[in-house]
Image (tube, grey):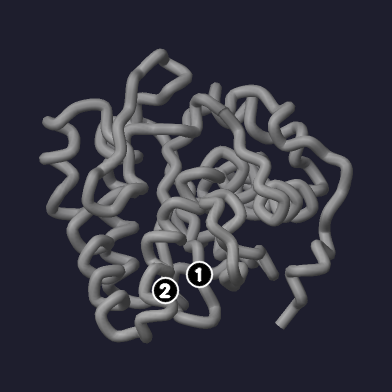
Amino acid sequence: MPDGSKYPYATDVDPASYPGRQDLIQCQTCFRSKGDGTTLFKCSGCGIDKYCSKECQKRDWPKHKIKCRMNQHTSNIIPDRISDIPERLRHFTSKHRPVLAAAAYQALGLETDISRAHSNLFVVCLRPRQGNARPETAFIAVDAIVSSLDDISAELRGQIKKIDEVASAKGMACIFILMQCMETNVSNLVPFMISDSTAMTMAPDFAGRWKATMTKALNEGQVLK
């Protein structure tokens, strides 16, 4: 396994400099974004998925409850000393959503073929950072790969299919990112709805160096506002 503590992909690129990042912070039901001026709140149960209204949160519950239950189950079976991993992963993911979306867009090659989002997902491999209390630096990124949807569980594919159908109905595409803690097998699925206008603003600064930029942001705790 790569040694993430050495920041193998770190560069001087500042991920906070790319435009359109507010468009990537979205309601998980209707996909209205902070870029539209929408005020979002987090689900009090998982602390990661965001909604623009109680109505949207209620509509999303049949899909969202699967994610919550998976992480609750993991919390019950892993040792007490690492039982906070699911919550830490949710907060870590929430802090870095815009950077993750931009990196996934480039890694999946969506700039040239948006249809790849329907058959692949972006997987970020992590390990916990010991003795660290800051949510944005709770994990170390050790690798990131593109994986076929055929290689994941049927349950996870089911979640992705439902979200993808919502995106298609809106004439949009959805990027799927799987945040995977390698030491505990805890994971977090992160969807990002993108439109043509969003795609145009999220790609340029990451072209050709998505892994370097993403890894620097995650490992150094650079959070986009």
Query: In the rendered image, which quarter contains the C terminus?
Result: top right
Instruction: State left or right for residue 118 relative to residue 44.
Output: right
Q: Is residue 126 visible?
A: no
| Quadrant in which residue 156 is drawn | bottom left
The numbered dot on residue 186 is 2
Where 69 falls versus 12 (above or below)? below
Q: Return the x and y of residue 17 as percentages of the image width and height.
A: 73, 27
The amino acid type found where label 2 is placed reads Val
Q: Name the residue under label 1.
A: 180
Q: How far apart are marks 2 and 1 (CA)?
A: 6 Å
In the rendered structure, the answer to whether residue 163 lies left or right of residue 214 reads left
Vertical placement of residue 173 versus 187, above or below: above
Asked where in the image residue 145 lies, by quadrant, the reply is bottom right
Q: Which amino acid does label 1 sit on?
A: Gln
User: Which residue corresponds to the image point at 68% horizontal and 68% vertical from the top-left?
Assistant: 143
- Give the crowd class for mark 2: few <14, some 14-19, many >=20 residues within 10 Å: some
